[in-house]
Image (cartoon, grey):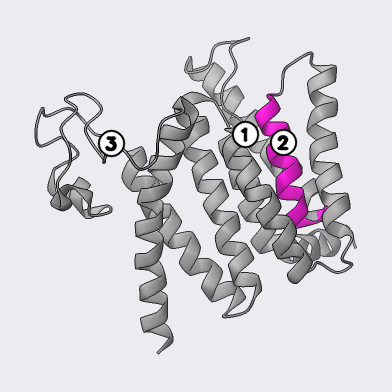
Amino acid sequence: MNLLLYTLTFLFGLILGSFFNVVGLRVPNKESIVRPGSHCAVCDRLLTAFELIPVLSYLFQKGKCRGCGTRISLLYPAVELLTAVLFTVATIFIGWSKELFVAWAFISLLMIVFVSDIKYMIIPDKVLFFFLPLFIVLRLIIPLDPWWDMIVGGAVGFGLLFFIAVLSKGGMGGGDIKLMGTLGIVLGWKATLLTFFLSTVLGSLIGVVGLFLGKVKRGVPFPFGPFIVFGTITAYFFYETILSWYIDLMT
């Protein structure tokens, strides 16, 4: 029975992942997520149902548009598959409890941010302002312990990146600041600090490697959102494990 439910969850995640691609690509451009229908960005041809099957369509078409032969970005199937995996992992880790709804909503925001920040280096306010009240309501219904941890978490997340932005004179984007504040409501202040630490470490490592390989230019900004996504997912699922490991290491 559980295997069937996990399979359905995985398929549900694939479908939502396809939708998150649309939201992440269209909202930053102030385009409707409904019309026009899914189409090739190069030849503008509307896609058929066969071309809209998550992941499989990309494989069947060998990563190319059936109309003009343009290479399709790997971002599309990657987000679809990652969403499906994360939805399923959340279900396995958390179980069929109320917190699962928080996890699914959380993952949904992170996937949209992942797409929009990689593609445009923008984290749309419209997306954040949709999820912010949703997370507040969810955390009031399914509170952290203590309940006020969501308030402190939001303040810590927003305040940390705002402080960095002031010190660096704009080195941190406003979208990143608002995103961390929103995520803090779900995580609480301790997991928010871990998210910040993990995101910063990974971002710094990738930045250094990118400079060494010539993929990143000094003084040219690159998207920080994907690193926040990585840090957030790790902190949300593994905070207690990481904390226990750290305590054991220090004792």
Rendered position, 66 above or below 241: above
Where does label 2 land, which residue? 178
Q: Are marks 3 and 2 in contact (CB under 8 Å)?
A: no
Image quadrant where residue 160 sits: top right
Callout 1: few (<14), some (14-19), or many (20+) C-alpha neighbours within 10 Å? some
SS state under label 2: helix
Disc marking residue 215: none
- At horizontal 45% and vertical 26% (from top left) the residue drawn is 29
The residue segment tinted magenta is 173-190
Q: What residue occupies the far bottom of the structure in this picture?
A: 1
Check residue 36 in the rendering and tell me which mark sits there, or answer none: 3
Do tag 2 and tag 1 residues touch (Cβ < 8 Å)? yes
Mark 1 lies on a secondary structure that is: helix
Asked if residue 114 lies left or right of residue 145, the reply is left
Disc 3 element = loop
Of 53 and 77, the residue lying toward us:
53
What whole-number distance in Å separates the C-alpha atoms at marks 3 and 2? Answer: 30 Å
User: Identity of the amino acid at label 2?
Assistant: Lys
Q: Residue 157: horizontal and vertical position, in percent?
A: 79, 42
Q: Is residue 74 left or right of residue 174?
A: left
Q: Quadrant of residue 186?
A: bottom right
Q: Quadrant of the image for the N terminus? A: bottom left
